[in-house]
Amino acid sequence: MEKRNESTTDVKFGLKSFLTVCGILLAIMIFVGILTFVIPAGQYLTDSDGKIIPDSFHHIESQTRLPVYRWFSAPIEALFIGEGNVTIIQIIAILLALGGTFKVLDRTGGLSAIVRVLVDKFYHKRYGMIWIITLFMMLLASCFGLQEELLILFPFFLSFAKAMNWSKTQAISMILITTGVGFTAALFNPFTVGISSGLAGVSLADGLLYRILILAVLYVVTSLYLVHSAKKDEQKTSDAEKTSFVPLSDEERAQYGRLALSTSLLFLAVLVVIVVFSVVPFLADLGLGMVAMTLTFVVGAFALGKTTLGSLKKSLLYFLSGAKDTSPAIVIILLAFSVKYIAENGDILHTLFYYCHAFISAQSPYVAVILLYVLVLILEFFIPGSTSKALLIIPLLTLAPLPGISANIIILAFLFGDGYTNVLYPTCGTLMVGLSLAEVGFVSWVKKTALFQLLLFVISTLFLLFAVYIGL
C-alpha cells in the first residue's frame, strides 16, 4: 500500500547536535580568551557617530585582560550588560514565539496542507521548484537583508523535503545556503551595502551592475548545487523509506486547498510586513521589523488555531509547548554572542585590524585585495554582525585607502567576507540555531558543504581580482 508523509513539523532541537554546537562554541570562547592574553590590546578612537578615526590606534596594555572566570561568565554578561544585549533579548524572544507559533500551525494542519498541495502540483517538477525557491530566498537576503527571520520557514521546508524524499540537511540548506549566498551577492541589502556605501561616501548604485552579474552567477551555481544534493538524497533513500507520490482526489484537493490558502495568506502577510519594515525608511529606522513580523505571525496563528481547533486554550497550550521545544536556542545564542563579547572586552579586534592593514598596504593591488578579503574573513569569525564590522573596516580603508583599490572594491570584499561565512562559521548564531533545529551536526554540515563553500570562495576571489583589473 502506498503511503503519504504524515509526520509533523514540530520545531525541536536534537540533543546530540545541540551538545555538539555548545561544545564547539565553548572551545571557541576559550580560544578567544587565550588570544586576549597573547595579542596586545589596542584601540582606535571613534567619533561621535561611532566611526573609527584613522591613525588613532594606541595600545592599552594596562587596561585589559579578562580573567579566566569571565570567559565562562561572558554569556550572562553579554545578555545583561554587553553592547547589543537588547538585540540578544529580542532574538531570544522572537525564536521562542516562532517555535510556539509553528506548533500551533502544525496542529491546525495548515503546513501539511500547503505541502500536500505543492507536492500534488509540482512533484514531477520538483527540481524546477528548487530554482524558484533559490531565487526567491536569495532576493530576500540580497535586497532586504533577511536571514535569521527566514528560519520561520524551516518547518515548511522540512515537510516539503520529507515529501520529496530529501534530507533534513537539504531542508535547512534551502534557507541557510540561499540566504547566505544572497548576502554575499547583495544588491540593496541595507545592513551591508547600505551601511558600507554610506560609510564609504559612495552611492548605493555604484558598482550595481557588477553586483547584478555576481548575483546571476551565484544564483546559477547555488541552484545547481541544491538540485545536485536533492538528487543525491533521492538516490540514498531506500525503496522502503521512500514516500510514494499519490495524487490527491478532487475532494482532498478542495479540502487541503482551502486550508493551504488561509495558511499561505498568513505567510504572505508576514513577508509583506518584513519587506515594508525593511524598505520604508522611518519604519526601518525603528528597528522593529522582526518584532512586527513576530506579532503578525503569532496573531495570525492564533486566529487560525481558533478557527481550526475551535479553542484558543488549545492554541495557547500548543504555543507554550512549541516555545519550550525551542528553548535550547537560548543557550546557543548566548554562547555565540559571548565570543564577540570576550574579543571586544579583551581589546584585540582593533589590534588585529591595525597590523593586518599595515601589511596589506605594502602589497600590490592584486595581492592586497586577496589579503583584504582574508582580513574580512578573519574579523567575521569574531564579529558576525555586519554593522559592527562595517564601522571598523570601511572608514579606515576608505579614508586611508589602499593603493589601486577603490571604495567599490573594498565594499565588495566586505560583502564577500560577510556573506557566505554566515553558513560556515560556528560563531554565526543563525547557522548554529538552524543546524540544531534540523538536527544536523556542525561537522556533518561542513563535510557536506565543503566543496560548495570552496567553490564560493574561488568564484568570489576571481570576481575581486577582475574588479581590480577593470578598475571598478
Image: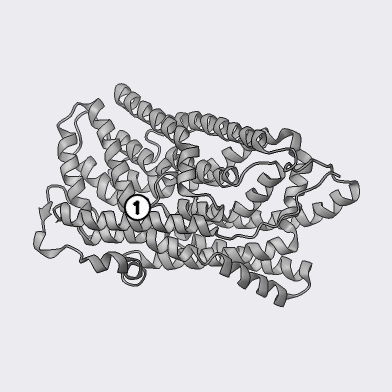
**Residue type at tag 1:** Thr
Residue sitting at x 70%, y 61%? 106
Q: In front here: 350 or 321? A: 321
Task: Point out the image quarter for the N terminus.
Answer: top right
Image height of 94 relative to 149, above or below: below
Image height of 465 relative to 434, above or below: above
Image height of 142 relative to 57, above or below: above
Residue 286 seen from this side: no
Drawn side of residue 73 relative to residue 99, left or right: left
Percent position of residue 217, x then y: 49, 28
Callout 1: helix, strand or loop? Answer: helix
When asked about the image quadrant of residue 369, the answer is top left
Pointer 1 residue = 387
Q: In front here: 358 or 119? A: 119
Percent position of residue 232, x then y: 61, 33
Drawn side of residue 1 relative to residue 83, left or right: right
Count of numbered badges drawn on the protein: 1
